[in-house]
Image: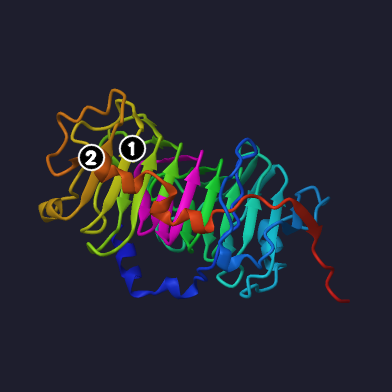
Amino acid sequence: MGVYKSKSKHNIANYYQIIVINIFILSSVTSSSMASSSLSSIDFSTAILIRVDQSGKGDFIKIQEAIESIPPNLNNSQLYFIWVKPGTYREKVVIPADKPYITLSGTQASNTILVWSDGEDILESPTLTIFGSDFVCRFLTIQNRFGTTGQAVALRVAADNAAFYGCVITSYQDTLLDDNGNHYFKNCYIEGATDFICGSASSLYERCHLHSLSPNNGSITAQMRSSASEKSGFTFLGCKLTGSGSTFLGRPWGAYSRVVFAYSFFSDVVAPQGWNEWGDSSKENTVYYGEYKCYGPGADRGPRVKWSKQLSYDEAAVFLSKDFIGGKDWLRPAPSHFKNAPKPNP
């Protein structure tokens, strides 16, 4: 993870446009979110539909081509919905900062796969990189097949107000670089071995399945909060933890690393100590690692390190709702109407 520490010198947040997001929910779930009154003039009911189909029956055969067809949209006046038909798309994809309000939707994660193989550099290796704010991803598998010999990011989320529903995200080391901003993951499957959910974001993971490939003493999280005043942290709510060998719940990439697991099932893959100080005992005084009403064979708090917390309800409450990520202000239901993209002038 040391390569990435130099990244703190770069203000990627300058690329962000923090306005509002159009969140698409799983088809079986109805969102109760209400539009912010300050943004009531924006029409979130209609999106421009772009089809990606490898057979040539859509508007494009590659995902990146579809993204490049979208004009810069910094006035935040239009939603775009990229519908990816089933297939394996072998490409590296970037959502630019000047193209917010894009939804990338597969048909289902089991048959709509975005895959690449790149490694060693945590910022250059991602299969999918998100810089555009107000982004939504649904029903898509995102893979980095670089292997087990170095950092290999499948997904990097470096934009504010991004949400992922029913996605599968897999690699080995640093699978998900949950970089900066407020993010929401629901019903996702995330797999890796070493620090496979890492970064500085404020993120809520709800009903996600985390699967560790580590043979011994890996780490699920490496959260990078660097000061007590920084808002960031990871919350895992109602999640399931499984694996093939021993793993820690987390270790501190940043001195004030903050991670909370609540109402989650821990298989016996979780190391009895629970958490690791990453060779720096001074961080034991500054990290915030908490558990609340977790269960399963790996949830026994008896052998846990003493500097982790068994949270009371009052301590846990701030982490147990979408308020932790300001979600009530930016999570949105799917649009009800679609229209075709305007044809370019000859």
Compared with 195, 28 (above or below) is above
Whether residue 134 is visible: yes
In front of the other: 195 or 117: 195
Disc assigned to residue 262? 1
Instruction: Place residue 240 in its image quadrant.
Output: top left
Does the stretch in magenta take in 233? Answer: no
Does the stretch in magenta take in 187? Answer: yes
Point 23% across, 32% down: residue: 271
Task: Tell me the kind of residue under disc 1.
Answer: Ala
Instruction: Place residue 217 in its image quadrant.
Output: top left
Compared with 260, 136 (above or below) is below
Q: Residues within 10 Å of mark 1 (few under 14, many from 20)?
A: many
165 to the left or right of 317: right
Specify the segment rendered in magenta.
176-203
77 to the left or right of 152: right
Q: Are marks 1 and 2 in contact (CB under 8 Å)?
A: yes
Task: Tell me the kind of residue under disc 2.
Answer: Leu
Residue 307, given in percent of the width and then of the height, sits at 14, 44
Point 45% across, 45% down: residue: 171
Disc assigned to residue 35? none
Question: Which residue position holds label 2?
Answer: 311
Residue 75, given in percent of the width and then of the height, sits at 63, 75
Helix, strand, or loop for circle 2?
loop
In front of the other: 19 or 192: 19
